[in-house]
Image (tube, rainbow, N blue to C red):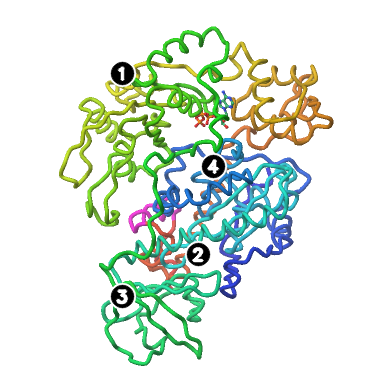
Amino acid sequence: MPGARPTTHAAVRTSAASIADLFSTQRINLEHSWRRCIDRYGLDPSAHQHLSSLSRSELREHSEPLDEVLVLAREELDYVYAPLADASFGVSIANMTGLILSYRSPQDEGYVSTEREGTLWAEGVTGTNGVGTCVLERRPTQVFQKEHFFRDFSFLSCAAAPLLSADAEMIGVLNFTSGNPALREDTFRLVSGLAIKTAERLSNQLFARRFQSRTILKARLGEDATLLIAVDDDQNILGANQAARLWMNWRDGAVKAQSMWSVFEVERPGERLQSGPLLLQREGGTLAFEVRVADAPRFVPAPAVSRDRQIAKPAPRDATHTPSVADCLGSDPRLARSLRVLTKVSGSKLPILLLGETGAGKDTMARAIHAEGSRKDRPFVAFNCAAVPETLIDSELFGYGAGAFTGARREGNAGRLVEADGGVLFLDEIGDMPLILQTRLLRVLESGEVSPLGAGKTRHIDVQVIAATNHDLRQRVAGGTFREDLFHRLAGVVIDVLPLRERSDMREVVDAMIARVGSERDLRLTDGAMAALLAHSWPGNMRELKFVLQRAVQICDDDLITSEDLLLHSGLSGGTPTAIAPPSFAADRPSTAREAVASAERELIEESLARHRGEIDAAAAALNISRATLYRKLRQHGLRARDFTR
Ligand SMILES: Nc1ncnc2c1ncn2[C@@H]1O[C@H](COP(=O)(O)OP(=O)(O)OP(=O)(O)O)[C@@H](O)[C@H]1O
């Protein structure tokens, strides 16, 4: 496999030349990237390429630099879901090795299965693409359909933008992806602008959080950039975001302790700063800043958070698109009993446990149960135990009081359990919940009371819990990684959401899905196509079926879907591969992904140590990880910091 060669990050550091470059939706020249793929990585554009991925637990190991971004992103992205939904885009966040750490789609139709968590998009493995190429170019990168190096990915359109730490170091990538082959280029251009602005907002929030106890000066430069500068009580500059660094002409990374008055001119230098407007001059130009002295009200607006927001996966725009519980269960006789039981318990307080493989429809079913039960006018709050970093599950789920810990939001956080009061709390991927939090959750479920950390009071809550997992929970209980008492507490009603290949009503499922994805069109399937669908093993279940049919609808002629339009991995006769293997469901090859990620990670660490001359604190800060993590990683990769001192 050509992608086994390591990716090279250190060699390409194209620093942005001007502020305008930071926000430019002007396409970068992808020819360089294609050249790298051929010359450096030895990739062959005519070859088929598969995606490799890491497991969820391996993924945790790599998420630390972006822990804070992942939490902030959930709120920030509320702003952009609506326009994204219209253009059938999903959002992913990747780290500097090109690994997708989080993927969300604003509505089900936007789901791009190639973006799922754990998928590796390093350029050295998957060729020119939004995430991997953005990591190397370190600037907004758009890759539209056939611009992808491998034709297996030419149905994708990716608009990627760098995420920067409070030290203006690139720590990851925000990527908007559409798998719609009919996407128009002008729509793509608009969405690219949105990706850049969203990444800027997230990066600026990291800055504002890091310096929340300091005085911050903020200015708008033209339509595009927001400049942020943090100063201490003696008016020495402590930090500046990337736009401010460019404006001040700081070309190297480190902030030199320097008085802001050596950079700016004002009529009365040295004056104590006060919250409010301030005109600062630099090299003949004047810029209007707004000063926020520490402890004054924040000017960084907290994103509007509605009480019943959908945390893990936002609800589809059009509620009429949500399948009913009966639609979800279909007519397989093994599920008829489940349907009867569900109609009786929905809206009650009895917990429901949904077991099923990934993509089988557990999330969809949970929403359907909520929508049809007596709690339908109350919140549906979804919480994905695997997507939220382990260190943050506690505070996100159970909440915390004002100022409970360093880095806590000033106003505290009610927590998802309290937000779901009166309604339904959907705990997705419950099998991934750490043991210590399982104990806490059990206590809450048994007592019906939550005590947010540091809030000093206990609150009674009334929620119906629907939990879901694709792990074999009983096996986890036997293996000691899942508490038996919690399992019984959650298993009020257990529904096995059958994998597609085991459903006896597959034909009906296909017909219903065609009607759903084909909207108004009068689509038909040839007998050959139906036979191919029935023979396929559907490892990605409903999600895969939906994706395959959505793609076939775009490709087929005269509203007639043939087996060729399905582009299924294996055909009917003897498993002969058809022209294009769907990349999303190619067999995962974790060892390849693991090796590529490890090699890219090693390069990033080496690069950072070299830049900071072996200084652990500086290198760890640039990588946005703790010193302890950096030491651990040095041991893992057999590196010594002292080899980088010059
Ligand atoms: N009954 C259904 N009718 C139409 N579409 C469905 C149905 N069930 C699931 N889907 C679609 O399949 C996709 C995957 O469904 P869903 O997210 O509910 O699966 P899941 O089991 O929760 O997956 P995961 O374990 O990966 O989170 C979604 O796009 C959803 O819209």
Q: Which residue is mark 3?
A: 275
Image position, residue 45 (x, y; %) = 76, 48
Within 10 Å of the Cα at label 3, are there few (<14), some (14-19), or many (20+) other Cα atoms? some
User: Under 8 Å from ligand 1: the CB of mark 4?
Assistant: no
Say which amino acid is labelled 3: Ser
Quarter of the image containing the N terminus?
top right
Q: CA distance from mark 2 to mark 4?
A: 36 Å
Q: Quadrant of residue 403?
A: bottom left
User: As displayed, is residue 445 above or below residue 506?
Assistant: below
Q: Residue under circle 2?
A: 607
- Single out the mark in the foreground, 1 or 2: 1
Disc 4 marks a residue whose amino acid type is Pro
**Residue 478 seen anywhere in this rendered image of the structure:** no
Dot 4 or dot 3, earlier in sequence: 4
Q: Nearer the viewer, mark 4 or mark 1?
A: 4
The residue labelled by disc 4 is 106
Q: Quick one: label 1, few (<14), some, or many (20+) residues within 10 Å?
A: few
Residue that label 1 marks: 488
The verdict on residue 281 being magenta is no
Residue 629 colored in magenta in the image = yes
Kind of residue indicated by mark 2: Glu
Q: Earlier in the sequence, mark 2 or mark 3?
A: 3
Q: State how far apart marks 2 and 3 are (Cα).
A: 40 Å
**Cβ–Cβ below 8 Å for labels 2 and 3?**
no
On the image, the x and y values in percent for residue 38 come to 73, 55
**How many C-alpha atoms fall within 10 Å of the one at disc 4: few (<14), some, or many (≥20)?**
many
Percent of width and height locating residue 155: 71, 43
Q: Rounded to the nearest whole Å, what is the CA distance between mark 1 and mark 3? A: 55 Å
